[in-house]
Amino acid sequence: MSKTPEELFAAEQKQSEIDHHVPTAGAMVNHIVSNFTVLDAKLHQVTWYVKGLSAPAIQHVLKDLIRENRTHYDEVGELLLDENEKPSSITAEYSEYSMIGENGKNKYFTADEMVSEAVQDYVTQNLFVDRAIKLAEKEERPALRNYMEKLRGDDNHAIRVLQALVGNNAGDGLEEE
């Protein structure tokens, strides 16, 4: 007898809970999928509210980063499916699993503060990427590991470009926890 959608989703949620407490490479990558969603909103917030002489340059860079972030979101979701995983696909999951915080007050930050917040978001994302790389290696999942290594490089590039916008070198003032 086939299971109902409710039963299938309940089983998925139960497995997800187990995977996030172990954790597995798939669960760690699912945090990254959720981070992509929140990062998309935050990058849009900056492009919409940034003010000052540097606003056009910041908006240009962030529009490119938004496109790249959305591409990663789609590719990682597909990769998880290829790996027999279930990528997060509802807002409640994104809220639960994202480790990038958001706040409405950020729209009132200075341009430099907005960009610095985005830099820190990429640093936070890299904590999960690095963990996913290690877990994928341990679980012998080369496709996940390879994509995460590429993502780490793309995130590092985004950090360098954003840091340059505020007059910093790539690693200046970064907080890795």
Image: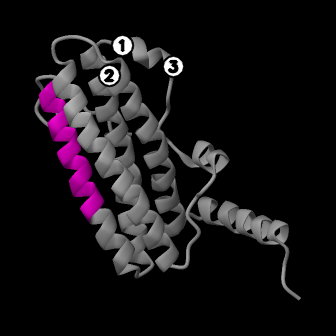
Say which amino acid is labelled 3: Gly
* Dot 1 alpha-carbon crowd within 10 angstroms: few under 14, some 14 to 19, many 20 or more: some
Q: Position of residue 135 (x, y in %)?
A: 43, 69
Q: x, y (%) of residue 44?
A: 39, 32
Task: Report the amino acid beneath label 2.
Answer: Met
Q: What is the quadrant of residue 64 in the picture?
A: top left
The C terminus sits in image quarter: top left
- From the image, tell me which residue sits under label 3: 104
Callouts 1 and 2 close, C-beta under 8 Å: yes
Q: Is mark 1 on a helix, strand or loop?
A: loop
Q: Please check the rendered image and state whether residue 72 is part of the magenta-colored stretch, yes or no.
A: no
Does residue 12 appear to the left or right of 34 in the view shown? right
- Residue at 36 percent across and 18 percent down: it is 49
Sort mark 2 into few (<14), some (14-19) or many (20+) by Cα contacts within 10 Å.
many
Q: Dot 3: what SS?
A: helix
- Foreground of the two, 91 or 148: 91
Amino acid, disc 1: Phe
Rendered residue at 63%/59% (across/down): 21
Q: Would you name the residue on which mark 2 appears? A: 114
Residue found at x 21% / y 27%: 58
| Magenta stretch encompasses residue 161 | yes
Q: Looking at the rendering, which quadrant does residue 41 occupy?
A: top left
Please give the residue where the numbered disc 1 appears in the rendered image: 109
The span shown in magenta is: 150-165
What separation in Å lies between label 1 and label 2 (alpha carbons)? 6 Å
Q: Is residue 174 visible?
A: yes
